[in-house]
Amino acid sequence: MQEQPVSGRRFPDSSVIAAGLFTTVIMLFIVFWLPRQIKDFDIMGWYGLFIVPVGAILVGIGAGSGYGLMSWFKGRKITGSLLAVIVALLALAYAAAQWVEFKSLNLERYGVDFFKYFDVTTRSMTFKAGHSSTPSGSLGLLGYLFRLLELAGFSLGGLFIPIMLRAKPYCENCLVYMRKGSRWWLPAAVPTQKISKKDPVAMQAYQREMDEAHKKGAGIINSLIAAVKERDVSTFRSLLRDNGVDAKAARKLFRSFFLTLHSCPQCRSGRLEMQSMAGQGDKVTITRVGLEPVDAGFVAALGDLRPANSPRASGKGD
C-alpha cells in the first residue's frame, strides 16, 4: 500500500506560516499608522463591558487570517500544533510591535531602556468609558491587567478563522477540505399554534404532538445513520424523499433536523453531517448530532435527491 503524504497533516506548512506572518505585519502596521493619521484613534484600546478587548480581538482576527486563508488554499489541515504555533507567533508579534514602537521614539539617548518604557506606558494607561470625553486617571498597576487582556485578545482573536476552518470536514487521503453540497431537512415539530394559557387541555395536547414529532424526527435520523453505515442507498433515499421538507417549511418549525453532504473535490468521497436546529428568528441553537463518512458511490447516488413534497420534486420550480 502506498503511504500517504503526511507533511500537510502533522507539521505546519511554511507557506501557511509565511502568510500568517504577512497578515500579522500588515495589521500591526495599520495599528501603528492610524493613530498618526487620526488623533486619539487607538483600536487596541477599544473595550466592551470594560474588560472585553474588542479592538485587540478584531486586530487579532485580521492578523491571523493569513493562517486560515492559506491553509484553505493549500489544503493544509488545521491541527492542534498549528493553533499553538499561531498563538505563540502572535504573542511574539505583539511583543515585537511594542519593541518597534519603543525604537521609533529613540528614547535610548535619554537613558530609557525598553523595560522602563514598557512599565511607564503601561502604568500611565487611562480608561475612557463610553462616549465620555474625560479619561480616567492613570491605571497604575491595573494597567498590566489591561495589557494582559490586550495580549490575550490579540493572540486568541487570531485563532478565529483557523478554528472555523478546523471545524470543516477534511479529506485525509487527498489532503484537501471538503466542499459543502446538498442539504436536506427533516421536521422535528408540528407547526406553531397559538393556544390560550387558559386552555391547559389544548396546551398539553399540543405539547404531546410536539414531543411525538421530535421523537419521530430523531428516529428517522437514527435510521438514516444506520442506512449510511450499511451503505443502503435505497433506504436512505426513501427515508429522505418520504419524510423530508424544503428549507422554507423547516425554518417555520420550532425544531428540525438538517443534513449536509460534504464531498472531496478530488476523490469524491464525503461526510454526511447531521445537525438539529431549535428555536426561531434570532434565537436559534444548532447542535451537531452526527458526522458519518460516505464513499464516492454514496455521494453520487444522493446528488439529485429531493423530498417528495419539495417544489423541485413536484415540478413547481425553485
Image (cartoon, rainbow, N blue to C red):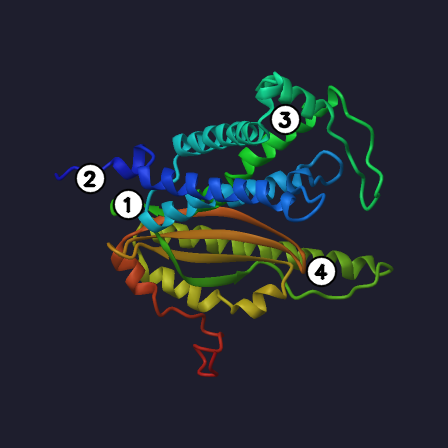
Q: Nearer the viewer, mark 4 or mark 1?
A: 1
Q: Which mark is residue 148?
A: 3
CB contact under 8 Å: marks 2 and 4: no
Q: Mark 2 = which residue?
A: 4
Q: Nearer the viewer, residue 286 or 38?
A: 38
Residue at 85% over, 39% down: 134
Q: Is residue 275 left or right of residue 272?
A: right
Q: Secondary structure at mark 4?
A: helix
Q: Secondary structure at mark 2?
A: loop
Q: Amino acid under label 3?
A: Leu
Q: Nearer the viewer, mark 2 or mark 4?
A: 2
Residue 53, quarter of picture: top right
Residue at 46% over, 52% down: 274
Q: Is residue 167 left or right of residue 43?
A: left
Q: Earlier in the sequence, mark 2 or mark 1?
A: 2
Q: Mark 1 = which residue?
A: 175
The answer to whether residue 141 is above or below residue 104 is above
Residue at 77% over, 25% down: 139
The answer to whether residue 135 is above or below residue 284 is above
Residue at 31% over, 33% down: 10
Q: CA distance from mark 3 to mark 1?
A: 37 Å
CA neighbours of label 4 inside 10 A, class few (<14), some (14 to 19), many (20+)? some
Quarter of the image where the N terminus is located: top left
Can residue 163 be spotted in the picture?
no
